[in-house]
Image (cartoon, rainbow, N blue to C red):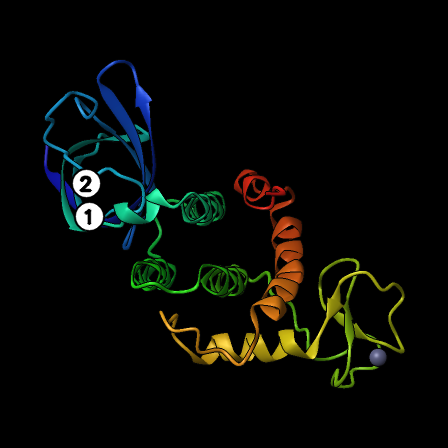
Amino acid sequence: MPRDQSESIILRTFPIGDQDKLAVFFGRQRGIFKGIAKGARKFGNRFGSSLEPMSHVTAFYYEKEGKELVTVSGCDLLESFFELQTDLEVSFTLGYFAELIEDSRPSLTEDDVLFRLLLQLLQALKAGGDLKLLTAYFEVWFLKLNGFLPELDRCRGCRQDITETGWLSHKRDGAYCDGCAPSRKEEVTQDLLAFLEWVRKNPPSKEYDVPFTRTQVDAMRRVLKDLIVFSMERTPKSLSYLDRPS
Ligand SMILES: [Zn+2]
């Protein structure tokens, strides 16, 4: 049986029996796939820390036709993000990224853009980047790449540019200007429109180099989260941990 390999990021693992682990991989060339790592729970096993969540690895595996799970024979660590997991809030946030990617991306497809985005975000976080800003950055791109980010800068009613406050449409397929809005629940602010433009033009960075305050970023995330919940037709499980009152 030929051995395949895939540059991947580990999204999560869970124990199988006493000795093995099941790992969910996000492969640069093949999207989401799952594999059994035999013996990964044994002391001193050959996988070492390569199966920790968000590890950037080259995974080696055997695949049998018709089987959903591959057999992982080895995993070379390219870059570890283990230290990020020691902060509970960062760890929950990474779980949120993983949940969104796993639930929305089809298997066996090349996904270079989202893969690079996740890797760059991990590197920015490791270098001390701002968690809330980078989370909002991820949410914008996640929505965009999945086709869930509607046109928000032009009114669905009168087709004029929204130059002051706009309101998200009930079906989340666009926004209305103040004059046309049938209901006013989620506010589409000029800040949000400027932030979407900023995200489109700038890489994720470890500096807090946006012209927006943290309070503004928090406020914009309400609309982004609303769009994510709507597009996934449920609240991501990890989001309920993240948003719990502290
Ligand atoms: Zn209008």
- Which comes sooner in the sequence, label 2 or label 1? 2
Say which amino acid is labelled 1: Val
Q: Is residue 200 above or below residue 81?
A: below
The residue drawn where x is 59% and y is 43% is: 246
- Res 24 label: none
Of 180 and 56, the residue lying toward us? 56
Spatial CA span between label 2 and label 1: 7 Å
Residue 215's quadrant in the figure?
A: bottom right
Of 182 and 222, the residue lying toward us? 222
**Which mark is nearer the camera, 2 or 1?**
2
Quadrant housing the N terminus: top left
Q: Is residue 170 above or below residue 8?
A: below
* Number of residues whose C-alpha sits closer than 10 Å to that of mark 2, classed few (under 14), some (14–19) or many (20 or more): many
- Res 57 label: 1
The residue drawn where x is 42% and y is 42% is: 88
- Res 50 label: 2
x then y, percent, for residue 224:
62, 60
**SS at mark 1 in the image:** strand
Of 4 and 41, the residue lying toward us? 41
